[in-house]
Amino acid sequence: MVTPVLPKLVGQRVKRREDPRLIQGRGTYVDDIKIAGMQHLAFKRSDVAHGRIRAIDTRAAEAMEGVEAVFTGAQIAELLAPMPIGTSFPSPPHRALAVDVVRYGGEPVAVVVARDRYVARDAADAIAIDYEILPAVVDPELAMTGKPAILHPEFENNVALPPLPNGTGVSRDGKTVDDSAIDKAFAEAEVVISQRMVNHRVVPNTMEPRGVVAHYEPGKESMTIWSSTQAPHILKTMIAAMTGLGQHQVRAIAPEVGGGFGAKINIYGEDYVAAAISKRLGIPVKWVEDRSEAFVATTHGRDLIAYVDLAAKRDGRVLGLKMRLIADVGAYNMLLTAAIPTLTMMMASATYDIPAIRATLTEVFTNKTPTDAYRGAGRPEATYFVERAMDMLARELKMDPADVRRKNFIRPDKFPFTTQTGAVYDSGNYEAALDRALEAANWKQLKGARDAARAEGRLVGLGLSMYVEVCGFGPSSGMATGGWEHAQVTVERDGRITAVTGVSPHGQGNETTFAQMLADQFGVPLEHITIHHGDTAVVKQGIGTFGSRSQAVGGTALHLAGARVKAKMARFAAELLEAHEEDLVFESGTIFVRGAPAAAKTFAEVAAYAYVPVPLPEGLEPGLSEEAFFEPSNMTYPFGCHIAMLEIDRETGEPRLLKFVAVDDAGNLINPLIVEGQIHGGLAQGIGQALIEETVYDQSGQLLTGSFLDYALPRATDFPRFELHNTVTPTPLNPFGAKGIGEAGTLGSTPAVVCAAVDALSELGVKHIDMMLRPEKLWRIIGTPPAPAHGGRA
Amino acid sequence: MIPTAFEYVRATSLDDALAKLAASKGEGKFIAGGHSIVPLMKLRLSQPKVLIDIARIPGLSGIREKDGRIEIGAATVHHDVATSALLRKQCPVLCDTAAAIGDPQVRNRGTLGGSLAHGDPSADYPASMLALDAGIHMNGPKGWRVVKASEFFQGLFTVDLAHDEIITGVQFTPVRAAAYAKLHQRASHYAIVGVAAALDASDGRIRSARIGLTGAGPCAIRLRKVEEALAGKTASTDSITAAARHAAADVQTVNSDLHASEEYRRAMVPVFTRRALEAALTRLQRG
Amino acid sequence: MAQVSIRVNGRVRKGDVEPRLLLAHFLREHLNLTGTHVGCDTSQCGACTVLIDGRSAKSCTIFAVQADGCDVTTIEGLARDGQLHPLQEGFWEEHGLQCGYCTPGMIMSAVDLLNDNPTPSERDIREGIAGNFCRCTGYQHIVNAIQYAANKAARK
């Protein structure tokens, strides 16, 4: 009898193992957790952007039936120190609940503990707070002059991070700066493109808002905390530190998590408060964020202004790039706030071999919700600024936007390539991606269609954008948490495989992709493998899911742990088969000597033997369970090219996306179906930012787009069908040659759409438009095009 | 978000509803689909003490034809209007309008009467009610009353409906050559500008036109100048285009918000007036 | 407090509720049917979508008392005798979900959509789920999933 050979699963469109529970409503998200005796928290939040708390009256709240306790900021300050951040940048003290001054609308000021969420909300609303209103700092460039107020006295002129230089001639420590190369580039330039650009603030809006259940058990002196988080191990570390417990006393669990997009890496004030209150009162407590709260209380993304100058020859060759960045980070530094815009500097070279670059970054505090990671985190901003500038250069030189890019690509033989800002790109073939995109979109024909539409008087434009992304975040030298990942693989007594991973998926499908890898590694069916994640009592160590690191770092750790178990299992099998382990084949649930499948032992037989090892092979311990920590040597750099076709309604200014073609190169793919899903999602967010998502504050610091009634979240009707293609350039940095794809969709899509809009309006002399493409904004441009001499339009 | 506490009662008849409203001593509100009031209650912008559910009052919902007129009950949901075969045939502008409201789930619950009573400046129905010259029927302690749509919408969230009255339905003569055109606010899908245009024409000539505008100002209004410009003209694209240019003339106060400034809204009025008229003309020509 | 009696997934469920209790919370807190999710507070996102008397509705915008005497179907009531509903199957086959939070509401809206229009175009599908937000998928695989279910029904 011939055992059918199991097909290899890596590279296949395997449908997800996560789905059966989720499509039947059987997933367990934080708000689905109930514990006997559990009380509910509701936060009283500041309704002013900047104010000094004169008085808080909690008496009415405390008197309500069903209210267990009320804590003000001052009372919480006795339980919790100021919140730590995850970078070494200077940071003002940030209390979980504001104590004397509130610095953004929505900052928590007091908290109610009550029987249920209805009573908790009633009580929170009954808390009266008297504020002395302070001037709201809203415009970051005005804020840098110290006007109209100072947020944190220890940060002069609201400058969170004084101009930090990067690029050609800047020493590693940033202390010495030699401008000669960049000055020379601009002196030799035949054409200089200069433009102020804004990459505006967006709200991450995971469909599941944040939530936390904290359960301190006094008898056991231990804390279990469930949180809608991307990083349960970071949560555990921080909760332990902040509540005075040892890490051995805290168990953190990320149950089903309804989206993260960077906004759930943070440990928020509400998490600490829940833990502190549970510990203080000795009862389990739950808090689940409302959407209205999420708009103000969960970190925002982007919000960078860039002054971009691009020096080039008339043949399109770029000589130098200056990029002066101003980041509006909001009111406080959160976990990674200060570090995110540094990634924009780091990626200033984009896909181009730019001989001289000078980037500088200033970070500024304003009376807004703090910013932090949002899908792409710093890299979409860099892509946007550089690609818009390249597009302007092409227009200035009357070159095809593809040609000017092609002229400046880093050549494939130059990898690994170190950019002027210090990034070390692992591998790339940018021209191949560009060509694939031009071919897939039928660029020439598309241009013909655009021109024909224009001849009819329609405003149709084409936009093209390259991108290079940074994935696989690590190594530890760049991350305060450590940049490794951990995994453990156990072959059970019955031959089934239990694996644990330190990454914490929340939609990425690692229960499937990781099982595909192990199935191939061990030659066993997918159904025989379970992947555990998200529970620090099960997963001993880990960092988490962010920075598109799951596959490149977490997947590699899993593969290494698997290899260790497999090697040990081979020793047991060799004993049973009286063979050398290097001659063994793992295939279709059996282990046999190469060329002799008839004499195979089943996987289960070998596993059983390993747990009752009589005789115990010399030098072996019983059992089949191994772990690995993988420290990557560097990050990976996937890339691609996106093309958009867009039409603007001449009468209303409404933009409509007609076509979108994406070519992405993430190296080798474990599961193309899941990769496509990741790209689609990234595209929707990137296009969403360009077309309909914008966070707007008024002059008093009130968020005007504080609900889905005013903040447009993209709907199915906002997109055409995306056309996806790929090229494959593996990374040499991990055994799978896989680079990562979680965030890449957000990079090229935003500039491609804006480039298309500018192209559509180019007949009116438009050279640049700041996002988002609000119909009224476009209508105004159509009604009053810029004067020819003026050039760019902000 | 969570509403404040209230008392809930269900009315079994119109009389019962009015009695319960009277008993609430000004603290009561009717609820049918709840898609105007519940969102406000959740944000605690509305805090009624008593909710009187009128959704199941017999005869309060449904679309009926009677003596050449069409009658729509106040508790009729938008979905039923959008998909009504009767309306599709005789008065498709109402199908357009209902189909442009919110999203499918909202259309499954939200009601005509609720929308009219709420008087939201960016609601869709008011434009069509004006274009159809509909009569809004209401009942109260003083008995039945019919108010013409052109007198019903009075101001921002203000309609000619006393606090002790209930809307029971609307009645109008169907117009086949009528259409609705709308500029969507991209987040909420409310109307930044919505125009319903109805043409009465014979032998290629427009006898009269009625045009309702919503979204632009504090409440929906008729665009009389456009109507006058169309009266007696040939039913053609040219006359429509010419007449639509007058659209802004009737618009006094114009709303302004982050989605559309006063200037933009004002400019969109003639655009959507023309688009609605064009669609109405197409229906006229197709018969 | 008010008495309600609601037929949920074929079973009559009674409860004493505060009039202000939202149907979504009645399902989740009183009946432990936590597949119905709450994703916003302005009746936009559709995560809480259930069927009331066969039509899709946002259960966060309806008080439980309003649904007294109604027939409610939630995501938990869709599979029959261990057989996934064709839409559930479609979402699985076509990778129509990632984090899964919007999924139950999305599927319930799609049930209503296909009841109304068994052979929808792509445009019909996109308009049919315009009351449901998804932040993960960019909707394309969701459209495919609904097409899968429609095609499967058409083959029968």
Image (tube, rainbow, N blue to C red):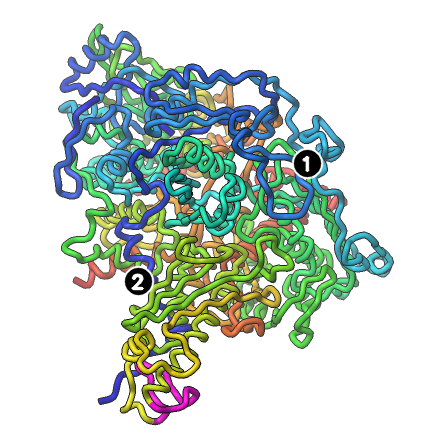
Identify the magenta region. Answer: A578-595
The chain carrying label 2 is C
Q: Position of residue C124 (x, y in %)?
A: 32, 50
Q: Which residue is mark 1?
A: A140
Q: Position of residue A78 (x, y in %)?
A: 54, 29
Front residue of B22 and B60? B22
Whether the magenta-drawn stretch holds residue A592 is answered as yes
Disc 1 marks which amino acid?
Pro
Query: How far, Cα to Cα, is label 2 from label 1?
Result: 48 Å
Sort mark 1 into few (<14), some (14-19) or many (20+) by Cα contacts within 10 Å.
Answer: many
Q: Position of residue A532 (x, y in %)?
A: 38, 59
Front residue of A241 and B232? A241
- Taking the image as shown, residue A407 lies to the left or right of residue A277, namely right
Residue at (44%, 41%) from the top-left corner?
A210
Kindly identify which numbered label has been placed on residue C93.
Answer: 2
Sort mark 2 into few (<14), some (14-19) or many (20+) by Cα contacts within 10 Å.
Answer: some
Corner quadrant of residue C4: top left
